[in-house]
Amino acid sequence: MREHDERHPGGVESLTPVAPRRLRRVLFRQFWRDLVFLHWEVDPFAVARLLPPGTVPDLYRGRAYAGLVFFRMEDLAFGGSGPPLPYVGSFNEVNVRLYSRDGLGRRGVVFRSLDCDRLLPVLAARAGFGLPYRWARVARQWHGNRLLYRTRSRAHGRPGGRVWVQVSDDVVTPRPLDAFLTNRWGLHERGPLRSYYLPNVHPAWTFRHCDPLDWDASPLAEAGVAPLRAEPDSVLYAPGVPVRFGTPVPLPPPGRRP
């Protein structure tokens, strides 16, 4: 795999099922379990206004997408081999994310909101990385082969995002759009001085067939990216993957060639 600072002669890195770059150092590790991805097409001009300096919207066939992603994070640990943090290292999370590219051609995600039901990780992620984490109530429940996630704001008590899916054991092959939305090997965020890229690696996704039974996509509109239609364009379920994150890499200032 290539180093994380390699330029891409074609302008944009390829979409690959595993990370195209190795991590020089592991900053922290975690396990993502029971992921449900819901995606809608959104206005690309709305997306462009919300991205960090030094990035532009990453479009699929000229279209922009926003994701509402539900999952359980487990076994958060620092470094390449340290033990998982007890209690605070496992929690439920719901995030709204957009898709970006930077001046080196790296594709990434940009989080507009991240709801988490553990206060300490919220405070640490906001202070250490500037990520828009919020302390919320996030419930995850299995009912046979049906999975339900629900969120509720602690600030005003109103219900937030929700998804209710029926999952089978049948493995499905992702469509090209699904690969575009999920084969992401880093995030872009505003830093105190410059935007940065935070790389990650994990094994290739395994997706299982799932049928959406109900959902509430109101967090997208709250994040400034209202869906163009009611029905999601992509619905995916993944049992989970172990994930490792590297160290932040500053982006070149906007308008300057890397």
Image (cartoon, helix red, strand yellow):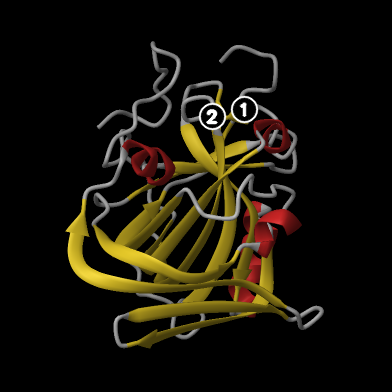
Which residue bears the numbered disc 2?
101
User: Mark 2 touching mark 1, by CB under 8 A?
Assistant: yes
Image coordinates for residue 38, horizontal then vertical, percent? 48, 57
Q: Is residue 209 visible?
A: yes
Q: Nearer the viewer, residue 176 or 110?
A: 176
The CA distance from mark 2 to mark 1 is 5 Å
Q: Is residue 50 left or right of residue 216?
A: right
Q: Nearer the viewer, residue 22 or 42?
A: 42
- Label 2 sits on what residue type? Arg
Q: Nearer the viewer, residue 162 or 12?
A: 162
User: Quadrant where the C terminus lies?
Assistant: top right
**Residue located at (30% from left, 61% from top):** 241
Disc with the residue nearer the chain's start (2 vs 1):
1
| Label at residue 197 | none
Q: Is residue 251 left or right of residue 104?
A: right
**Residue located at (27% from left, 53% from top):** 205
**Residue located at (54% from left, 69% from top):** 215
Which residue bears the numbered disc 1?
56
